[in-house]
Image (cartoon, grey):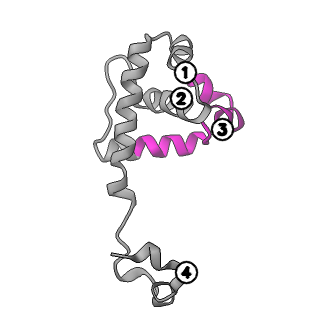
Amino acid sequence: MDSILNRGDRHCVEQIHMKPVVLYNLCDVLTSHDLLRSTQNVSIREQVIVFLQIVGQNQRFRFISGIYYKSVKTIHRYFRIVLKTVLKLYKHLIKNPGDTVSTEIMNNLRFYSYFKV
């Protein structure tokens, strides 16, 4: 896991499709909102990296389990935990438009389907 982060930004982007600083920020957001916790055997960072490798590179659980020396069952468990956690982030990231949408956009027929109630 640390080999991904310690080999430079380019290697990190190739492996998980984000720079280390973005990964750290994502882990901080998940921690600060109390959505994800480290366990005795797997840190938050490792959980997120495993998730990103599976999603970003279409890796199989068996392949990832060989990299991290964990069982397929363990990899699958943490993948599901992080997936559910990421899905919960919408409450913190997506806001109702309210009055912040300009009237020019609200009254444009091109965008009508996005603002139907």
Q: Earlier in the sequence, mark 1 or mark 2?
A: 2
Placement of 107 over or under 33, stated as above or below: below
Residue where numbered disc 1 is placed: 60
Mark 2, other Cα within 10 Å: few <14 / some 14–19 / many ≥20: some
The reply to whether callout 3 and callout 4 are in contact (CB within 8 Å) is: no
Residue where numbered disc 4 is placed: 110
**Spatial separation of the CA atoms under disc 1 and disc 2:** 6 Å
**Spatial separation of the CA atoms under disc 4 and disc 2:** 37 Å
Residue positioned 39% across, 16% down in the render: 74
- Foreground mark, 2 or 3, reads 2
**What is the total number of numbered labels drawn onto the structure image?**
4
Q: Amino acid at mark 4?
A: Arg
Q: Earlier in the sequence, mark 3 or mark 1?
A: 3
Residue where numbered disc 3 is placed: 13
Secondary structure under badge 3? helix
Point out the image quarter for the N terminus.
top right
The reply to whether callout 1 and callout 2 are in contact (CB within 8 Å) is: yes
Residue where numbered disc 2 is placed: 54
Q: Amino acid at mark 3?
A: Val
Residue positioned 68% across, 34% down in the render: 14
The stretch of residues the image draws in magenta is 1-28
- Foreground mark, 4 or 2, reads 4
Secondary structure under badge 4? helix
